[in-house]
Image: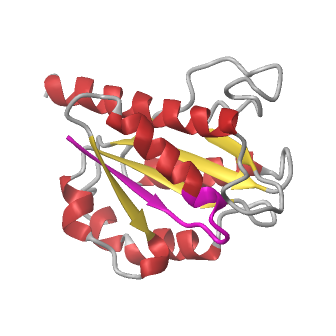
Amino acid sequence: MKIAIVYDSGYGHTARQAEAVADGIRRVAGAEPLLIKVADGETPWATLADSDAIIFGSPTYNGTLSSRLKKFMEDSTRPAWLPLAWRDKIAAGFTNSGAQSGDKLNSLIAMALFAAQHGMIWAGVDMMPGRGADDMNRLGGWLGAMAQSDDVAPELSPIPSDLRTAAHLGERVAKLAARLKSNA
């Protein structure tokens, strides 16, 4: 079972979140994460077509997605959109910003709407909000995994609880994709 992680990362913080999502996917027997950086420019259509799920990730800049992820969504996916080639694939999302809120919800809504337009099935975070910095889902995201990064090297931020939340999302998507695949 293959799960694509299509993401952008301006400074490396969202890339750490993508790696955490991949770690969560690896927790599920038979699940293989496929990291796809939109900054590389070429869309691997065959890989996305063969994927059982697609997880989208972007930093939140000025309350919305990065321009590169927007470009991928708006300009690149027409070949998959017209025939609804991604119909019934599990989809999910994650985002990161410098502020605690940073309007990350807007980025996740944009990803979920994009997935809905492709006929995908959206999976959010299935846990209650944490109450402290060490708790998973400390930022209280329901629609996807949220992280906050300080203006430091990506090795130092986002904090471990945000990365554990991202890993949980990856594991959840892999389990849902496996369940959907076994019932097909």
Kindly identify the residue that appears in the image at 45 percent across and 69 percent down.
Answer: 37
Task: Give the percent coordinates (x, y) of residue 91.
Answer: 42, 43
Front residue of 154/168: it is: 154
Task: Give the percent coordinates (x, y) of residue 16.
Answer: 57, 54
Front residue of 63/30: it is: 30
Whether residue 113 is visible to the viewer of this picture, yes or no, is: no
- The structure's colour scheme is secondary structure
| Magenta span of residues | 1-15
183 left or right, relative to 107: left
> Image quadrant for the C terminus?
top left
> Image quadrant for the N terminus?
top left
Kindly identify the residue that appears in the image at 76 percent across and 29 percent down.
Answer: 138
Kindly identify the residue that appears in the image at 75 percent across and 21 percent down.
Answer: 130
Q: Is residue 146 above or below residue 99?
A: above
Q: Residue furthest bottom?
A: 41
Query: Magenta stretch: residue 169 in it?
Result: no
Front residue of 116/179: it is: 179
Which of the 4 image quarters holds residue 98? bottom right
Q: In this view, does 46 lie above or below 57?
A: below
Kindly identify the residue that appears in the image at 83 percent across and 55 percent down.
Answer: 150
Task: Give the percent coordinates (x, y) of residue 74.
Answer: 49, 73
Front residue of 76/33: it is: 33
Task: Give the percent coordinates (x, y) of residue 121.
Answer: 39, 37
Q: Is residue 28 above or below residue 107?
A: above
